[in-house]
């Protein structure tokens, strides 16, 4: 991994500090599913399933059509299992960016969601991603 | 009813064809070149489904749904045959059958006939009804019959889904429970909330199936999922007792209530 990736890891870690109960996380590029940053224990291989999940959720069209409001793509997902919450968000400023965080189940879903949105916004607006063409 | 061998796509396509008719349209949706049967439509609603070989089935169902004696039933049938009346309605008019008993028997009869008509894909053709209508007392929306048909194959799942969705009586909430047909691997609606159409249920089922697919890579299988668009519209999907549920609501507070309820259940 390059030094640039390490600095992205740091930026991601810093942005996600306020997200309650984060275990691991991944920052990825869509639609390729390229892992460009990560936080938490483990290696890039451990984060690969998160990236693939992001691609499944955000990489293909799954528009929600409402007659009154027109069709719109899903940009945020939350998955709740017995032991963890998984949040998957697409960047609102840079739509090729996807952030995936795995948090402990005890954390409040609304807080986790709100904090994850803020974290992604910080990454989108303060991190230099020009090297990745974003 | 045994759910094997039913072409659910053909069945729901036929009902969607009726759903898309003009509200004042009446006629017959015929199945097969050799007229294997059809769906009689009165002003956009289904009043009768006929399938060859099931001509006497309604009598059996009425006997099951009510306490009427068989001899009495045969007497009224014969009387209606001679006079050209509808024997179900005659039974109700004579006080031999409660209206809800007839409605239940008619619904089940229609469901069984639909299944029989959709054992294999048959061409369908709608012929508008000219002149006097059928003037039936009991008619069904296409979506009602779809749910009745699926429910007749999955009665326990339908009862379970009714219990689950009854607890979510939130204004503006559109929700549905889906059973999985193992044969075709498709989602079949068993209960719906919010007065949706079959097209609406198909959209919900697409989003419902999206969630399990999206979570395939995760280490722990989620029991609950939430997705939102940038416009703020949301869909909730959850698994319980072998059923897949999907809900959407314009009112975010309503969705928050459903989410909160589900999270509390998970925590217990």
Image (cartoon, coloured by chain):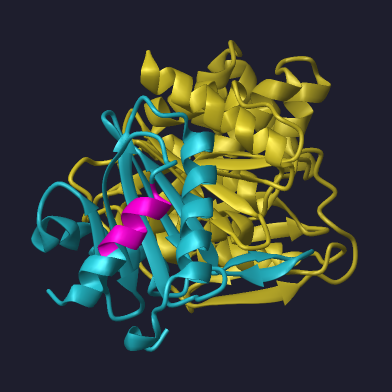
Chain colours: A cyan, B yellow
Position of residue B260 relative to residue A89, above or below, is above
Q: At 73% from the left edge and 59% from the top edge, which residue is drawn? A: B41
Position of residue B97 relative to residue B38, above or below, is above
Left or right: B59 in relation to B94: left
- Residue extent of the magenta highlight: A9-16
Q: Quadrant of the N terminus of chain A?
A: bottom left
Residue in the foreground of this view, choosing between A109 and B70:
A109
> x, y (%) of residue B23?
84, 62
Residue B72 visible at all: yes
Q: Is residue B196 magenta?
A: no
Left or right: B89 in relation to A49: right
Residue in the foreground of this view, choosing between A42 and B225:
A42
> x, y (%) of residue A5?
23, 72
Q: At 60% from the left edge and 23% from the top edge, which residue is drawn? A: B166
**Dominant secondary-structure state across the stretch colored magenta:** helix
Residue B246 visible at all: no
Position of residue A36 relative to residue A46, above or below, is below
Q: Quadrant of the C terminus of chain A?
A: bottom left
Q: At 30% from the left edge and 67% from the top edge, which residue is drawn? A: A8
> x, y (%) of residue B176?
54, 42
Q: At 76% from the left edge and 65% from the top edge, which residue is drawn? A: A69
């Amino acid at each position: 991994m390059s030094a640039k990736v390490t600095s992205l890891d740091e930026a991601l870690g810093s942005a996600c500090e306020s997200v309650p109960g984060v275990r691991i996380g991944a920052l990825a590029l869509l639609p390729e599913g390229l892992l460009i940053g990560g936080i938490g224990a483990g290696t890039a291989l451990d984060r690969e399933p998160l990236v693939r999940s992001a691609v499944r959720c955000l990489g293909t069209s799954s528009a929600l059509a409402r007659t009154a409001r027109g069709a719109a793509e899903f940009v945020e997902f939350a998955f709740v299992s017995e032991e963890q919450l998984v949040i998957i968000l697409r960047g609102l400023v840079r739509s090729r960016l996807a952030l995936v965080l795995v948090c402990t189940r005890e954390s409040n879903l609304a807080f986790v969601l709100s904090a994850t949105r803020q974290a992604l916004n910080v990454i989108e607006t303060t991190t230099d991603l020009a090297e990745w063409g974003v | 009813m045994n759910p094997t061998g039913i072409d659910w796509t053909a069945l729901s396509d036929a009902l969607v064809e009726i759903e898309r008719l003009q509200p004042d349209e009446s006629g017959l949706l015929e199945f097969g070149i050799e007229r294997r049967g059809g769906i009689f439509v009165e002003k956009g609603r289904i009043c009768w489904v006929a399938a060859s070989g099931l001509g006497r089935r309604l009598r059996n169902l009425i006997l099951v749904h009510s306490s009427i004696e068989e001899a009495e039933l045969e007497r009224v049938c014969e009387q209606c045959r001679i006079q050209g009346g509808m024997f179900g309605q005659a039974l109700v008019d004579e006080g031999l059958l409660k209206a809800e008993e007839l409605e239940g028997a008619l619904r089940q009869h229609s469901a069984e006939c639909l299944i029989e008509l959709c054992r294999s894909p048959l061409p369908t053709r709608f012929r508008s009804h000219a002149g006097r209508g059928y003037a039936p007392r009991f008619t069904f929306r296409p979506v009602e019959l779809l749910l009745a048909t699926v429910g007749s194959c999955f009665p326990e799942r339908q009862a379970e889904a009714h219990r689950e969705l009854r607890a979510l009586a939130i204004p503006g909430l559109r929700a549905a429970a889906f059973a999985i047909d193992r044969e075709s691997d498709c989602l079949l609606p068993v209960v719906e909330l919010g007065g949706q159409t079959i097209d609406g249920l198909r959209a919900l089922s697409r989003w419902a199936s999206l969630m399990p697919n999206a979570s395939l890579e995760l280490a722990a299988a989620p029991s609950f999922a939430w997705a939102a668009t940038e416009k703020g519209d949301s869909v909730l999907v959850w698994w319980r007792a072998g059923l897949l549920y999907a809900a959407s609501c314009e009112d975010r507070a309503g969705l928050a209530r459903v989410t909160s309820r589900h999270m509390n259940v998970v925590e217990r």
